Image (cartoon, helix red, strand yellow):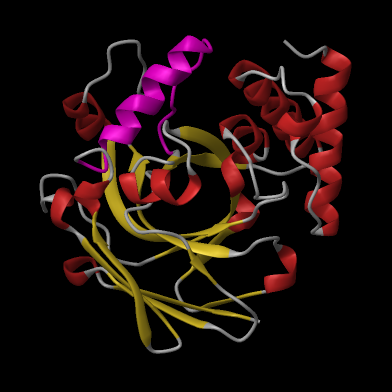
Amino acid sequence: MLSAEVIAQIAAELARADREHTVIPRITARWPEATIEDSYAIQGVWRDTQVAAGRTLVGRKIGLTSKAMQQATGITEPDYGVMFDDTVHESGAEIPVDHFSNVRIEVELAFVLKHPLEGPDCTLDDALAAIDYAVPALEVLNSHIELEGRTIVDTISDNAAYGAMVLGSVRKRPDEIDLRWVPGVLSRNGEIEETGVAAGVLGHPATGVAWLANKFHQHGARLEAGEIILAGSFTRPMWVSRGDEVLCDYGPMGTIACRFV
């Protein structure tokens, strides 16, 4: 376990990298003894400094929930991070690429909770009962730690590489649509780059919500009503650069467009 001083030091490094849009050396290269518990402690210190600075927490992201993402990163278990209100965009947004590092896009579904959700034995059915509606989402990845050789400890410490999300306008209750078969066709500048279906996320995209509730129980917490839960990508991440036009077609759940400037 890392000391409280080292945890605070790393959290401060990551906060500075976020402000300056830079990248720091791998945590696990400098502190190979760091554990997953340490990484969530680092993320927690960083989160608390952001809240203290006036940012408002609106939800959680779940990452690494599909085989596509696990193979793309070499990391084999899910993780989670926090999302703040100033990172949420609507379809059609222009997103400044300079606000992020190692900028990539992922195709996901997001869920808004109507009831609190708590472990330790939360099931998919429990999660579906707590969800108000699903909405399509693109996640903008923002990695402040060098990518080569990173582990889940590095990724979790870096708020699970979350940067921003772009939400669509079509909302569906879980009983209105078979969420497993929501498609995603992701294009960059008119060319299709990635495709997938939401079942690629743990067999059902809401399974990650149940996983997160159970994980939170280990930390003495629960998911609250009104929170947005970004459920994990069902395509590989797509790199984007300034000037790129991004479009994702979710079939019956509409489309999302954004432009990087």
The one nearer the camera, 157 or 136, is 157
170 in relation to 205, above or below: below
Q: How many marks?
A: 0
Residue 99 position, x and y percent, is: 73, 65
197 horizontally vs 93: left or right: left
Quarter holding the N terminus? top right
Residue drawn 64% across and 42% down? 149
Q: Nearer the viewer, residue 174 or 122?
A: 122
Q: Is residue 154 magenta?
A: no
Q: Which residues are magenta?
A: 204-226
Quarter of the rendering containing residue 2: top right
Tell whether position 218 is magenta: yes
**Which residue is nearer to you in this view: 112 or 209?**
209
Image quarter (top left, top right, bottom left or bottom right) of the C terminus: bottom right
Q: Is residue 153 visible?
A: yes
Residue that appears at 75% across and 26% down = 45
Q: Tell which residue pokes out farthest to the bottom in this image.
A: 190
Question: Is 191 located above or below residue 112 in the figure?
Answer: below
